[in-house]
């Protein structure tokens, strides 16, 4: 058996089209153009690429993009002042501060300063608490992308045995909350789990979010299961180059799973598309409009 | 085999002693007497009993108790005004609004008005979010009681397979978070779980919080497992009276489990003791003191 490959690139493209249509309706029906502000501190090359892609895709969806690139030596107070200005700016509906921040800045202080209504990354404790208690929330983008990809395979996730490997605040814990909201039976496994292969083998839906290259082997996967691989790990090749691999040993898993996301081209492309969707959601809520 | 009975009454008494000692130290070392305000709206007899017990135990622990008993016809605005006054009152370190509230009052609006630093019930989204993201938080009392009772049996819960049956905001979801913080592998099961008996049988540690009398049968329990029964259900007896039973069929479970909480006398007595502990914690944090 060879698994169905879940095409994150195509799904993300389709989601971006939906977002662009929603933006067009916001403009024509309400005269509102959503605006996303992205703040980058310092020169981290990966972050710079990511911020550039966000800006481009924001504009392509018909929204306004505001990029704030600050020197690596920017003080925490300067950054907090900028966030406060963006909170107060009615043209800005979403605020994203690109992580990681330089070491002299307290990341949690910065996140705590973002207006929860504009916190399109969903990292503010108010959004984490709203998600945890079943209230409407801005939810971290990668977990939302995982659920959308799972629903490419299963129109209804209700009653499925979901296993989430990894318990980060950015992926593992919020994706577990989302899957619980979808009525999955949810298990959260992690580095202290006693028999991780056996726990993984229970899963109808396996979410791998550990950040360890190819840790999850083919024989950890229940035949026919759906596998969503959040990992993006760069490893050296024999030819002295590097290549990207996920947290799942894809070549083995593809022979066992029913459906699987590739790396690259799986969860990765969904993250920015979900960010754009969150920006539209935030804009609608700020203007007292129902969610799309 | 007959299970060890986990004595919630004795554990709660011991916890209250610890709280009283912590209060005595707060007074002698810092001149601070913690104060807990409890607000009761209307005449619900069960709530009245519960509020009276809270007040008595608060005073017995050496703290100040402020009881606010309001008429069932109290408007939402009047209640919100009272909460705002208690937020501003430096003598009040903890605020508990007894639930359920009369139907004309929006419970979530009331909870959202409580200062998160004084929210000793742990129901505010800020506390739910802090718990969900691993920050210090005021945590709902019953889940804390469950974990303390589990630790009467296991000094370290790390690596245990925990199954939580029930996903309420008051018990199921926060207890799952706490068990994850204790490094358990945590499964959350619920009404949509496909094979609940089989999922329960995985558990080294089973937390039953569904509110359905004796739903969990003896043969759902792994031999030797620790069972914490949160349910308090009143059912009719053949003699036309009523009696209290848990969510677990105790007479069956006690033959299979390694340890089990009785109902009554298990989780129940822990709740107020944990509330007192939270009030001391809140007081220390408000005064810039380290947690005990």
Image: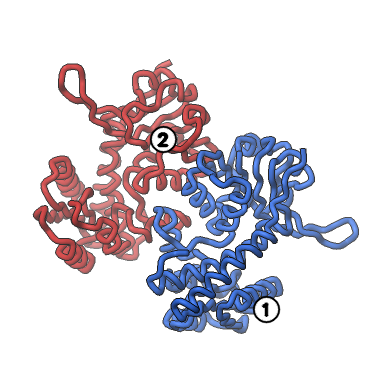
Chain colours: A blue, B red
Indicate the position of residue B124 as horizontal and vertical percent values: 33, 58
* Relative side of A175 to B81, left or right: right
Marks 1/2 in contact by CB < 8 Å: the verdict is no
* Same chain? Circles 1 and 2: no
For the residue pair A150 and A230, the one nearer the viewer reads as A150
Residue that protrudes farthest toward the front in the picture: A28
Would you identify the image quadrant in which residue A18 lies? bottom right
The chain that hosts pointer 2 is: B
B154 relative to B174, above or below: above
| Residue bearing the label numbered 2 | B207
Cα–Cα gap, marks 1 and 2: 49 Å
Label 2 Cα crowd, 10 Å radius (few <14 / some 14-19 / many 20+): many
Q: Quadrant of the N terminus of chain B?
A: top left
Task: Point out residue A230 in the picture as x, y percentages from the top left corner.
Answer: 65, 54
Residue A80 makes an appearance in the image: no
* Drawn side of residue B77 relative to residue B252, left or right: left
Q: Residue placed at 43% from the left, 73% from the top?
A: A115
**Image position of A26 (left or right of B145):** right
Which residue is depicted at the point 61% across and 78% down? A59
Image spot of residue B37 (x, y percent)? 18, 56
Q: Is residue B256 above or below residue B90?
A: above
In the image, which disc is placed on residue A43? 1
Q: Secondary structure at mark 2?
A: strand
Disc 1 is placed on an element classified as: loop
The answer to which of A136 and B7 lies nearer the viewer is: A136
Residue A257 location (% of width, % of height): 70, 41
Q: Quadrant of residue A223?
A: top right
- Disc 1 chain ID: A
Picture layout, residue A154 above or below residue B263: below
Residue at image x 50%, y 64%?
A123
């Amino acid at each position: 058996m060879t698994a169905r490959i879940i095409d994150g690139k195509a799904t993300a493209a389709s989601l971006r089209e939906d977002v662009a249509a929603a933006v067009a309706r916001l403009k024509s029906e309400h005269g509102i153009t959503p605006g996303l502000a992205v703040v980058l501190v310092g020169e981290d090359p990966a972050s710079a690429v990511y911020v550039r892609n966000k800006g481009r895709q924001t504009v392509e969806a018909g929204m306004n993009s505001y990029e704030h690139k600050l020197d690596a030596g920017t003080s925490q107070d300067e950054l907090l002042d900028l966030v406060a200005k963006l909170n107060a700016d009615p043209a800005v509906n979403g605020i994203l501060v690109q992580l990681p921040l330089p070491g002299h800045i307290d990341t949690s202080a910065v996140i705590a300063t973002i207006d929860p209504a504009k916190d399109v990354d969903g990292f503010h404790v108010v959004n984490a608490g709203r998600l945890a208690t079943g209230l409407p929330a801005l939810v971290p983008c990668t977990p939302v992308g995982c659920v959308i990809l799972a629903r490419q395979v299963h129109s209804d996730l209700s009653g499925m045995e979901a296993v989430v490997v990894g318990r980060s605040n950015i992926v593992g814990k919020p994706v577990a909350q989302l899957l619980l909201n979808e009525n999955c039976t949810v298990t959260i496994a992690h580095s202290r789990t006693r028999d991780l292969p056996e726990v993984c083998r229970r899963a109808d839906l396996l979410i791998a979010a550990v950040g360890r290259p190819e840790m999850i082997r083919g024989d950890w996967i229940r035949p026919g299961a759906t596998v969503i691989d959040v990992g993006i790990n760069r490893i050296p090749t024999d030819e002295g180059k590097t290549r990207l691999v996920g947290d799942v040993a894809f070549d083995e898993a593809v022979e066992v799973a029913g459906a699987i996301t590739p790396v690259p081209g799986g969860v990765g492309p969904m993250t920015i598309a979900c960010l754009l969707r969150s920006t539209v959601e935030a804009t609608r809520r700020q203007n007292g409009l129902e969610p799309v």
